[in-house]
Amino acid sequence: MKHVPILVLDFGSQYTQLIARKLRESGVYCEVVPYREDIADIKARAPKGIILSGGPASVYSEDAYRPDDAIWDMGLPILGICYGMQLITQHFGGEVVPADHHEYGKAKLKIEDECVIFNDVSDLEVVWMSHGDRAENIPEGFRVIGTSENSPYAAIADESRNIYAFQFHPEVHHSVEGVRMLKNFAKHICGCESTWNMGSFAKEKIRDIRAQVGERKVLCGVSGGVDSSVVAALLHEALPKEQLVCVFVDQGLLRKDEAAQVQTMFRMLDIDLITVDARDIFMGALAGVTDPERKRKIIGEKFIEVFDAEAKKHTDVSFLAQGTLYTDVIESVSVKGPSKTIKSHHNVGGLPDWMTFELVEPLREIFKDEVRALGLELGLPKDMIGRHPFPGPGLAIRVMGEVNEEALRLIRESDAIMQQELKATGYYDKVWQAFTVLLNVQSVGVMGDNRTYDNTVCVRMVESVDGMTATFAHIPHDVLEGISRRIINEIDGINRVVYDISSKPPATIEWE
């Protein structure tokens, strides 16, 4: 088990993963583990400091989440955030109670006393609060270092034990100097150095791949998207050509002309690519299926079956490589803590019992923006790295209800027009992700003098960094109007276009 400078214990906050991101951006490698992580595994990682995340529970509840008590005896610096602060308060003899006034959103943090964790932070700073409980009395040995209007103990510290606690969330974008506070904890309190970057990560993963694979072969599932392309490039760097079998499955759920584009791209990268035409297999399995979770599971199962059939054509294939990301893992299963399952991902959750492959998932612990940086580090073309994310289940989850050839025609053509308009107006690179969704809702329209009763397409564009949170993109009305006009005029079967203005959370980026 590798050394991890900062370890975050996850108590279920929606913001937990941002802690890791913000520290990595400052050059300090950080990992998130469940709050219930075994103390032996924590010690094996040899962290220099521990952060206790926020969470939805109350520390005075009978079923409150609690870490192994041995963490308090390790002698390591600890930073508690929100729920983590309340754990610290309770553990060391203070009192936590329901707050008279819940504090959600922006608040003004007033720094009451000097502390190294507030180095280079202004005396009155905007922070992000999200809590219903508060500390009523702080433990002996702690002092107040920060207050807000509704939190007399917004920040506390016990330097003798190297324990610090914030009622607010420094990891959230709205906490203006929050990243500086996290850096101060990591660098000045824990003694971590800024040595982690994508160059070092690439070298580490190449070493890991070689150690895991040895002289055996790896089957790499390729979609043509950023994630699987970066995985293929990593494997290409790590292994001799004869050990890498890259397989591109055309499942009939791709965007317009995408199969040809993928093949051209891999020729440019000098990576051999086997293309499997599995359109009939996938479309047959999806016939009559409308439930989104069932679609995802069917697609995941069929991908595995196709890859297994292809692997049997080659000798000594022992591994299946996938472009699984941290975001996929978090949304699919609660492997990192008590977080709620949002939706399943076709490449998360392991392999079926009947398969003998081992998984190679070198991107499993990094975010989308980090994947892009890794791709550039590996020398992949910028236009490929800049492609918008595309889900593994493809267009199947952008068609509400049953997937059939007519629905796919409508979604492909509308998506292609939208992409063309975004590139022509310079907005393609200004949004994180953009796509169309076929709602399978018909509405009345008029074209010329004729009444129509045709389909509605939704345009979805978001701004994000890592896909964990997102806001809808504020696209000029004339650009949206151009997209709408072309879709309605050029595609038979669509007479209405709407724009999705919901953010994540509460919505997800994809509709299914």
Image (spheres, rainbow, N blue to C red):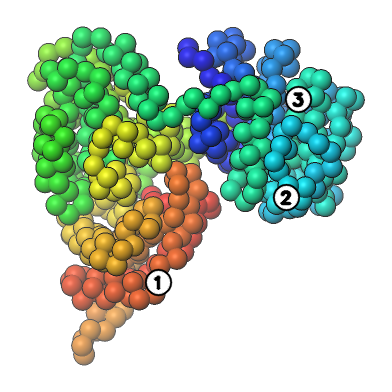
> Horizontal placement of 19 versus 489: left or right?
right
User: Looking at the picture, how far across and down is residue 377, in whole percent?
Assistant: 32, 33
Q: Is residue 402 above or below residue 78?
A: below
Q: Residues within 10 Å of mark 3 (few under 14, many from 20)?
A: many
Q: Nearer the viewer, residue 397 or 116?
A: 116
| C-alpha separation, residue under disc 1 versus residue under disc 3 | 49 Å
2 vs 3, front mark: 2
Where disc 3 sits, the SS reads strand
Inspect this view and state whether residue 356 appears. no
Q: Name the amino acid, label 1.
A: Pro
- Horizontal relation, residue 186 to residue 253: left or right: right
Q: Is residue 487 visible?
A: yes
At x 16%, y 34%, the residue is 269
From the viewer's perspective, tell me whether residue 194 is left or right of residue 422: right
Among the 4 quarters of the image, the one containing residue 206: top left
Point 49% across, 56% down: residue: 471
Give the residue at x 30% y 47%: 386
Query: Quick one: label 1, few (<14), some, or many (20+) residues within 10 Å?
Result: few
What's the residue type where badge 3 is placed? Ile
Q: Amino acid at mark 2?
A: Glu
Badge 2 density bin: few <14, some 14–19, many ≥20, Cα 10 Å: some
Report how far apart the C-alphas of labels 2 and 3 lie in the structure.
Answer: 22 Å
Q: Secondary structure at mark 1?
A: loop
Residues tagged 1 and 3 counted as in contact (Cβ below 8 A) = no
Residue position marked by numbered label 1 in the rendering: 476
Residue depicted at x 84% and y 42%: 112
Q: Which residue is mark 2?
A: 125
**Residue ID for mark 3:** 163
Image x and y of residue 406, in percent: 18, 59
Q: CA distance from mark 1 to mark 2?
A: 33 Å
